[in-house]
Amino acid sequence: MLQLQVVREEKDNIIAALQKRNLDAAPLLEKVVLLDEKRRTLQTRLDNTLAESNKLSKEIGMLFKSGKAQEANVLKEKTGGLKEESKSLGDELSAVAGELQDLLYQIPNIPNALVPAGTSEEDNEEVFREGDIPTLDTNALPHWELAKKYDIIDFELGVKITGAGFPVYKGKGAKLQRALIAYFLDKNTAAGYTEMQVPLLVNEASGYGTGQLPDKEGQMYHIGADDLYLIPTAEVPVTNIFRDVILNENEFPIQYTGYTPCFRREAGSYGAHVRGLNRLHQFDKVEIVRVEHPANSYKALDGMVEHVKSILRELQLPYRILRLCGGDLGFTAALTYDFEVFSTAQDRWLEISSVSNFEAFQANRLKLRYRDENGKTQLAHTLNGSSLALPRVLAGILENCQTPKGIKIPDVLVPYCGFNIIS
């Protein structure tokens, strides 16, 4: 959420910056500024009314002590009117403040200057590519066929138990899944991230804190009886650890990692491009989250990108990095890099990670601050990234590592899973 003071002072600049998102924010920001002026006017009137009421109350006490009850009673009638006025002003102020907050929740983050212009994923900018795309046998199969051939993932059984998008991993498929989770966590902790195990359900305040609500409400599974949400990513509970927290400047950087199952409704996702592991309603993911001093957040973002690159190098998967354009940039992000693995059998790129800097956008929602060297509180910066999402990594391994003899496991994973081939 953008700071209200920034909106007031930089309205025209924000409108111009949000055009990169293909958003005409002028009407919304004009309404915010007008509503804020109304809020401040009401607050001034309320403060003055309360001050006058307090002043009269003191005068009434002095008049009663002086034996001037008649004069005191006249003033008491006046204070009664002031109390009614204060209540009315307070109610109106509360309604205006609520409406203003709702409007601020509708304004996306300001894109960083590095974000390219564009309207869709077709306009994302490729900034890096590494790894050789393997030449597969003419009988090479997509991962959903390999999963059936080697009996390692059962999509139909998942449909029977729950529905589409909830696969069942079996035998070596389950072991490989577990191996990837352990490997990712070990890589992250070795890089200085503290492992956290967090709840899979969050309350509404947590959803608003990281920006999933109200923007992605339709994509989250909601438990109505308890008003809780199944998490779409570990980013939500991990980042909310810092909701309503004031840090000391010497606590930076803060680096957390966590493994969780993730749940996304993915409404409207149909067709061949979402077959198999390409898009699921439940999937496993290892996340990295950082809380940084604003002066260091973009250096930290570069470090996160390099960290994910090191993992993909060890997995020996061909990948590329895209800088997302304004039209494809997430609501809360100022700058995002997407990692994509090439699926040789499907002849297409599959997104496996997003690494983003949110600057102060989430911190403002979370009220996450730090004390600077002068003792003044400032908003921190938050970042997060997938390190990594498992389904498409697993799809990439199955498809790119298939041989006539079976699926060769990347060397780095063999100690974790205990076998070097699925056959």
Image (cartoon, helix red, strand yellow):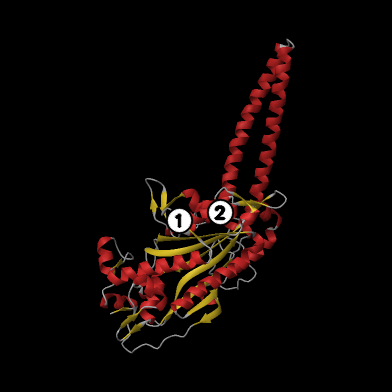
Q: How many marks?
A: 2
Q: Secondary structure at mark 2?
A: helix
Name of the residue lying farthest toward the right: 66
Could you tell whether 83 is left or right of 182 in the image? right
Based on the displayed image, in which of its 4 quarters is residue 383 positioned? bottom right
Tell me the amino acid under the disc marked 2: Tyr
> How many neighbours does mark 2 have within 10 angstroms: few (below 14), some (14-19), or many (20 or more)?
some
Query: What residue lies at 42% left-to-right and 69% top-to-bottom?
Result: 183
The residue labelled by disc 1 is 217
Residue visible at 47% across and 49% down in the picture = 204
What secondary structure is found at the residue carrying circle 1? Answer: helix
Residue 246 lies, with reference to residue 136, above or below; the image says above
Residue type for callout 1: Glu
Q: Residues within 10 Å of mark 1 (few under 14, many from 20)?
A: some
- Disc 1 and disc 2: Cα gap in Å? 13 Å
In this rendering, would 129 be left or right of 160?
right
Q: Which quadrant, please, contains the N terminus?
A: bottom right
Find residue 52 and report its image quarter.
Answer: top right
Picture coordinates of residue 11 (x, y %)? 68, 58
Q: Position of residue 240 (x, y in %)?
A: 51, 52
Q: On residue 279, which mark appears?
A: none
In this view, the residue in front, 354 or 85, is: 354
Residue 127 image position (x, y, % from top left): 57, 78
Position of residue 253 in the picture relative to residue 213 (left or right):
right
The residue indicated by pointer 2 is 105
